[in-house]
Amino acid sequence: MNFMTIMLQAQAAATPQQGSMWSSLLMIVMLFVVMYFFMIRPQRKQQKELDNFRNTLAKGQKVVTAGGIYGVVKEINERDILMEVDGNVTLRVDKSAIMRDPRQ
């Protein structure tokens, strides 16, 4: 009889309860919600602001590239810009390399 009781207890422990499955699923869903609000949403907002900045570039505006080069926009094309770095030194840079306005 003692052996039978141990086997029944082991079988009951091995089968998951219905409530624990739903609580586990709820925890996973909550983890994704928290990740969305703390990681994905702010990153999307920052990317939108950067895209808006790149699309509103104007001649004479001071910019910084991803590599840390400071310059002034001289010419704007669809995919790239021509920026003056120092004196007569100009560089053609892809728009995606422009990161921010140095005054910010």
Image (tube, rainbow, N blue to C red):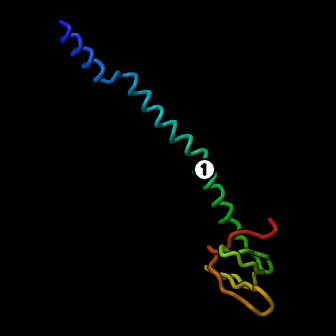
The 10 Å Cα crowd at callout 1, few under 14, some 14 to 19, many 20 or more, is: few
In percent of the image, x 79 and y 87: which residue is there?
86
As drawn, 28 above or below 11: below
Q: Secondary structure at mark 1?
A: helix
Name which residue type carries label 1: Arg
The residue closer to the viewer here, 5 or 46, is 5
Residue drawn at point x = 44 percent, y = 27 percent: 23
Residue drawn at 32 percent across, 24 percent down: 16
x then y, percent, for residue 69: 71, 78
- Residue farthest to the front, as pictured: 2
Q: Which residue is tagged 1?
A: 41
Question: What's the residue at 46%, 37% (across, down)?
Answer: 28
Say which quarter of the image contains residue 77: bottom right
Left or right: where 36 falls relative to 55: left
Give the vertical position of 8 relative to 65 (above or below). above
86 over 33 or under it: above or below: below
The residue lying furthest to the bottom in this view is 88
Question: Height in image: 27 above or below 53?
Answer: above
On the image, the x and y values in percent for residue 8 come to 23, 14
Give left or right: position of 25 versus 15: right
Q: Quadrant of residue 22?
A: top left
Quadrant containing the C terminus is bottom right
User: Position of 5 compared to 62: left or right?
Assistant: left
In the image, 1 versus 103, the foreground residue is 1
Is residue 11 toward the left or the right of residue 94 in the image?
A: left
Quarter placement of the N terminus: top left
Q: How many marks?
A: 1
Counting from the top left corner in percent of width and height, residue 58 is at 76, 76
